[in-house]
Image (cartoon, rainbow, N blue to C red):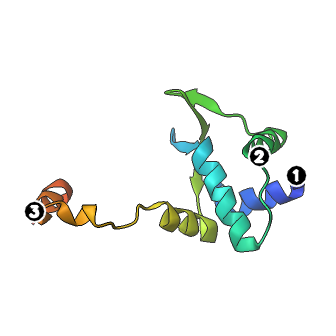
Amino acid sequence: MTDTQISKFLSESVVFEDDTEKGLDFDTLYGLYISWCVLGRKVPIPDSAFKTALALEGLKPAKENGQRIYPGMSMVGAAARDYVVNSLPMWTETATSIPVQELIDEEAVASIA
């Protein structure tokens, strides 16, 4: 993969926000890249080469709680949707054993009305 392809991946799948402390950890960014490759029918490079390509693009991670975080980055576009959809856990038989009321209580939000 060339630097041009990494640039294209970044321009199509990532936005940079200077005013936020949030960012993407390396595993999420690499997963997003894999989704981008699948959608574009490209062969992904190994994660170590991807890390090097990001550095060549001038992106330096910051260490936060033992993880490499790329600050100010957010996912966008088709690859982001693909990554999120395919990262959600599948519904399983064991998930049906959780009482419905317990699920409702965990996700309940106070109403303003």
**Contact flag, marks 3 and 1 (Cβ < 8 Å):** no
Compare residues 9 and 113 and report the one nearer the observer. Answer: 9
Instruction: Report helix, strand or loop for mark 2.
Output: helix
The structure residue drawn at horizontal position 80% and vertical position 63%, both measured from the top left corner, is 43
**Residue at numbered disc 3:** 101
Task: Give residue 50's position: percent from left, percent from top.
Answer: 77, 46
Q: Is residue 60 above or below residue 73?
A: above
Task: Give residue 72's position: percent from left, percent from top.
Answer: 59, 44
Q: Quadrant of residue 19?
A: top right
Say whether residue 89 is visible. Answer: yes
Task: Give residue 45's position: percent from left, percent from top.
Answer: 79, 53
**Earlier residue among tags 2 and 3:** 2
Three-letter amino acid code at the position of disc 2: Phe
Classify mark 3: residues with Cα within 10 Å, few (<14), some (14-19) or many (20+): few
**Contact flag, marks 2 and 3 (Cβ < 8 Å):** no
Task: Give residue 29's position: percent from left, percent from top.
Answer: 63, 50
The structure residue drawn at horizontal position 49% and vertical position 27%, both measured from the top left corner, is 65
Q: Is residue 31 above or below residue 52?
A: below
Q: 110 left or right of 21?
A: left
Q: Which mark is residue 56?
A: none
**Earlier residue among tags 1 and 2:** 1
Q: Comparing marks 1 and 2, which lies closer to the viewer?
A: 2
**Residue at numbered disc 2:** 50
Instruction: Report helix, strand or loop for mark 3.
Output: helix
**Earlier residue among tags 3 and 1:** 1
Q: CA distance from mark 2 to mark 3?
A: 44 Å
Q: Which mark is residue 3?
A: 1
Compare residues 15 and 96 and report the one nearer the observer. Answer: 96
Three-letter amino acid code at the position of disc 3: Gln
